[in-house]
Image (cartoon, coloured by chain):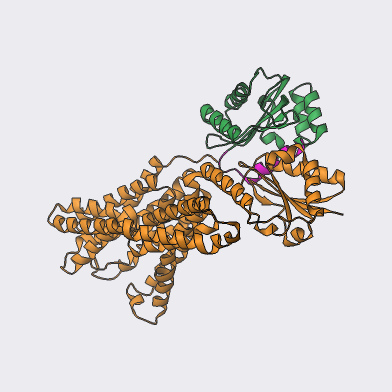
Chain colours: A green, B orange
Amino acid sequence: MEVNEFINQNLIKMNLESQTKDQVIKEMVEIMAENEIITDKEEVIAKAMEREAKGTTGVGKGVAIPHVKSNAVKKPAVAFGRSQAGIDYGSMDKKPSYLFFLITVPEDSHDQHLKLLAQLSRNLVHDDFRDKLLDAKDETEIMSILETL
Amino acid sequence: MKKIVAVTSCPTGIAHTYMASESLEESAKEMNIKMKVETQGSVGVENELTEQDIKEADAVIIAADTNVSKERFANKYIVEVAVADAINDAESLINKALEGAEKGQTTQINNDLYNQVSQEKSKRKESRTGAYKHLMTGVSFMLPFVVAGGLSIALSFVFGINAAQEEGTLAAALMQIGSGSAFALMVPILAGYIAYSIADRPGIAPGMIGGMLASSIGAGFLGGIIAGFLAGYLTQWLKNHIKLPQTLQGLMPILILPFLSSLIVGLLMIYLIGPPVQGIMNGLTNWLQGLTEANAVILGLILGAMMAFDMGGPVNKAAYTFGVGLLGSNIYGPMAAIMAAGMTPPLGLALATVLFKSRFTRQEIEAGKPAWFMGISFITEGAIPFAAADPFRVIPSTMTGSAVTGALSMLFGVGLKAPHGGIFVLPIPNVVTNLGFYALAIIIGTIVTALMLRILKPKLTK
């Protein structure tokens, strides 16, 4: 199981245009739809919002990890987006978020995929991993950072 | 060196569970404290805490947005927070845990605060998972009983279709295992684990008792599903609404909850569910008697659909009893239609799991294999796990296939003189008339059932 099985350069957006939480979720879901990861945009947005309602996925430290488990997802995937200005995501530390990972998995996902996503989540806790993502110049560099997982 | 054990868990279990775990481990490393974190995420439980771990630990941290069972941490100081708190500030959590432990505090597992928290959480859990999850829990626990029972019964037929009636024979023993025990437990297990999924452990007793009553009043597995949900939600409600002084708290799980909920569920099953079930059965029996003169094909169609509707419930039993009754009057056509229609539900499902794999879970595909044997042995129960898991799609499919088979069997003028046995009666001379057409009717019904499932069941995305 390799990281490039669920993320590639097309799923990376270096400069998100959104300014609000709702917008950024839609923008990220749009990336998934363009890459034909998901079959039903509205369903995925609704599921993501539902998860946010239970507690924000803006975990602080400038990171937000909206995630969706749904039958409208064809295969496990991660979309990465970065906002230069920062977006008020209702984060736990009340600070703006810069790094966004939208994680989508089908209802009955293979354990291998979930383990890899778990690994990604673990790394996001580390300052240097986040700093590298913030400093990366382009999609290629993001990919090479993620490949160190 | 101080040691802390922790559990992290979040609703979807994809990201936060692991971030919290990592945070706790990192902070502990910096603070020079031993830390073991159990993650309860989408992959299941990982890095599980052993009894030894818990014994050695000075304190416990639970960082979860789901219901984490605390029973195993009795007599430890527990710091319980939302999963997010562990991600943001693991260090102060660890400090808080150590402080509490140093003062020699322990957390009373049964105090009011704990109850309130756990009630809040179970409420959230309920809205999150929904009825479907509960149903699936019940079905997955029931499945092995269906398989073990069905195959034992099928095996008993190998010794001759009436061999089990001879007391003391191996065939009788197999029948006792399969029909008398495994199948008798099937509906109670289904109901018990539906209730367990809703109300945790206190749900099991009222659920199983309600399921047992569903069996004995003849309500079949559909009655069992009703009993399970009734027991689960009732127990949950009682848990939330009975307020006792703290000194009497201990009586809740061992005396008050099981007794009260079983009593209420039991009475409801007997007085509320029982009479209509009996009424349905009597009404249908009378109605069928009036149909004896009706068009044979239509009768076959109706009997077939009835056989597949509740597979052992009142509708099925009315049809079956009707057919067996007619044998006494030397009328053999309806019996043939009934047995054929009772064979096609498991056969059709087995065929569908082979042809249309993308529409079934891995567990269902596995369950499809023994369903072949149950189908050819006229053990309609083989279809119950599928029907219970997805009643609104599976039952119409099996009913259509069985109705077609019943109608064809009557159309071809097939007669059957034995009331059970499936394929095992076919080679016995003079039991079946028109054997070739009988097989054809069963095969067509099986294919129709599978095709209906193809149409009605949506694809599962892998």
Predominant SS along the magenta part:
helix
Of the pair A81 and B412, the residue shown nearer to us: A81
In the image, residue A119 lies in the stretch drawn in magenta = yes
Q: Residue at x 72, y 61 (%)?
A: B51
Where B410 sits versus A107, above or below? below
- The image shows residue A73 at horizontal and vertical percentages of 56, 34
Residue lying farthest to the left in this orientation = B293
Q: Residue at x 82, y 43 (%)?
A: B27
Residue lying farthest to the bottom in this orientation = B168
Position of the C terminus of chain A, as image quadrant, is top right
Horizontally, residue A41 falls left or right of residue B87, namely: left
In the image, residue A26 lies in the stretch drawn in magenta = no
Horizontally, residue B289 falls left or right of residue B384, namely: left
On the question of residue B415 being in view, the answer is no
**Which segment did they paint magenta?**
A106-123
- The image shows residue A57 at horizontal and vertical percentages of 66, 33
Where B356 sits versus B284, above or below? above
Q: Residue at x 37, y 71 (%)?
A: B157
Horizontally, residue B392 falls left or right of residue A66, namely: left
Quadrant position of residue B176:
bottom left
- The image shows residue A70 at horizontal and vertical percentages of 55, 37
- The image shows residue B348 at horizontal and vertical percentages of 38, 52
Of the pair A59 and A111, the residue shown nearer to us: A59
Where A93 sits versus B26, above or below? above
Where B172 sits versus B453, above or below? below
On the question of residue B23 being in view, the answer is yes
Of the pair B262 and B197, the residue shown nearer to us: B262
Position of the N terminus of chain A, as image quadrant, is top right
Q: How many marks?
A: 0
Q: Residue at x 32, y 74 (%)?
A: B162
